[in-house]
Amino acid sequence: RTMTMTPPPCLRWAGAAVLLAAPLVAAVAYSLASRAIRVPSKRRKGWYLFIGGYTRSQQADPFLDIGGIPHDESKTAAGITVLWLDSLTGSLETVGVCPAGENPAFLALHPTLPVLYAVHEVEDFGGFDETDCLGSTGGVSAFSIEETAQGQVLLRHMDSLPTDGGAPCHVTVEKSGACLLVANYSGGNVKMIPLHNNGSLSSAITAVDQLEGSGPDLSRQTSPHAHSTVLDSSQETAIVADLGSDRIVCYAFRASTFTLSRTRETRLPPGTGPRLTLLHPTGRFIYVLGELTTKIHAYEFVRQDTGPGSTTVEGVSSGVLGKLLFSQDTLPPDWKESPKMNDIEIFNGGRWAADLVLHPSGQFLYVSNRLHDLITCFQVDDVTGALSAVGFTPSGGQVKSPSHAFRTHSTHVDPRLAPLMELPTVNRLAFARHLEPCSAHQMGDICL
């Protein structure tokens, strides 16, 4: 199946890398989770952005259950949206929307090939065409990104596989392109899937690890919920955040033999709800974001090679979390949890952290907080890993995720674009222009 999008002549896809010429930040007012999925262009300085989304109304509009308001089917995403981002001006142009199966919520790019991966955040995946009965599982699909002689941008469906767990919400691709890792949220497990040389999915060998445990929050933590998978720079350690049991689980990982072996579990304070982890470029620190507490917990990241408690598996020297260095709230110190203004703000006490992203320089860390609608910027001490808050920027909508050089945020109220610009002296964020409507985007858009 091929999905065709015809952009203006100047909006053509090409494969060579382009360096960003200005520190711009694009904040998109409707995503729910994650990272910038960017494909550069030779025709002019900029990027194509791919946006995943919820096509099912109960996930696209989750707050409408509060107060018994029915879901609005018109507020769902239509599939994977494609935008053009001008890296010099920060302007965004709509290229098209591509049908991509049910709930193509989280996206990732192949490290060397023009291939895009999307996890289908459902619990009843029936294949890409929804014609098969695959049981209580989500799915993952691979799409090739192509350009025709007529200048059309294509997302061509390559293949799909079940993820052996419900509601997959995160996918990470190993840097050589040998395999990918999927975190299944409701399934509470992590799955490794090999990749063929052309980037398509392979079912020849797979590895699945089922997590266990629960936490004190009866609305969110009655069972394990794998929320993210991260690989360290050596690609020898896989790190999984289990929101349901307040644990970070480390694995010894080898892509060449598809080895995934659990090595150490680190327990966080009860009720933290770890959502994401982020390794500092030095490799000495790892930051853990608690969704339910909006706190960052910083740990030493250490490697163990031999001796008692060794994490060496078939010659793999894996890393583990060491001692806790500090914990820090990401909300302003003068923020008050009361009085509550509406039912949505009451949700989880107004604390619902979404994402954390490190500036390419390693000097600044950005954190997004939903419900509080804020992007927080911390300055990072590269010797100690300590964080110092340097700015709190309103998002202009219900914030979801900052994303690399371009920060994204979202709202369930109004699908608008809110470009932000980094101020070079302190790396704070400021609005570059007024919010602008963009008709191609829907409430259900989740991942930029």
Image: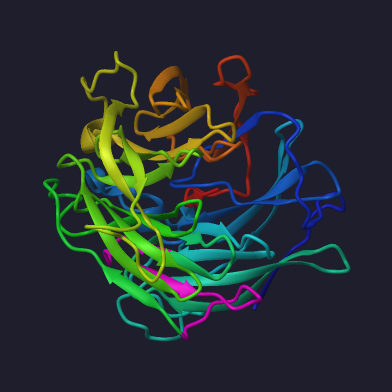
Q: What is the total number of numbered labels drawn onto the structure image? A: 0
Say whether residue 189 is magenta: yes
Quadrant for residue 7, please give it. Answer: bottom right
Identified at 53% across, 58% down, the residue is 107
Quadrant for residue 28, please give it. Answer: top right
Identified at 25% across, 38% down, the residue is 323
Q: Is residue 268 visible?
A: yes
Q: Nearer the viewer, residue 13 or 265?
A: 265
Indicate the position of residue 85 as horizontal and vertical percent values: 71, 42
Indicate the position of residue 371 as horizontal and vertical percent values: 34, 33
Identified at 50% across, 55% down, the residue is 234
Q: Nearer the viewer, residue 109 or 341?
A: 109
Indicate the position of residue 152 as horizontal and vertical percent values: 80, 64
User: Is 144 left, or right, of 60 in this rendering?
Assistant: right
Q: Nearer the viewer, residue 373 or 176?
A: 176
Q: Which residues are magenta?
A: 182-204
Position of 127 relative to 333 (above/below): below
Q: Is residue 124 visible?
A: no
User: Is 156 left, or right, of 27 in this rendering?
Assistant: right
Q: Nearer the viewer, residue 132 or 49?
A: 49
Indicate the position of residue 89 as horizontal and vertical percent values: 75, 30
The figure's colour scheme reads rainbow
Provide the major secondary structure of the magenta segment: loop
Identified at 83% across, 52% down, the residue is 8
Say whether residue 345 is magenta: no
User: Is 59 left, or right, of 96 in this rendering?
Assistant: left
Position of 180 relative to 395 (above/below): below
The residue furthest front is 307
Position of 442 relative to 280 (above/below): below
Q: Quadrant of the N terminus?
A: bottom right
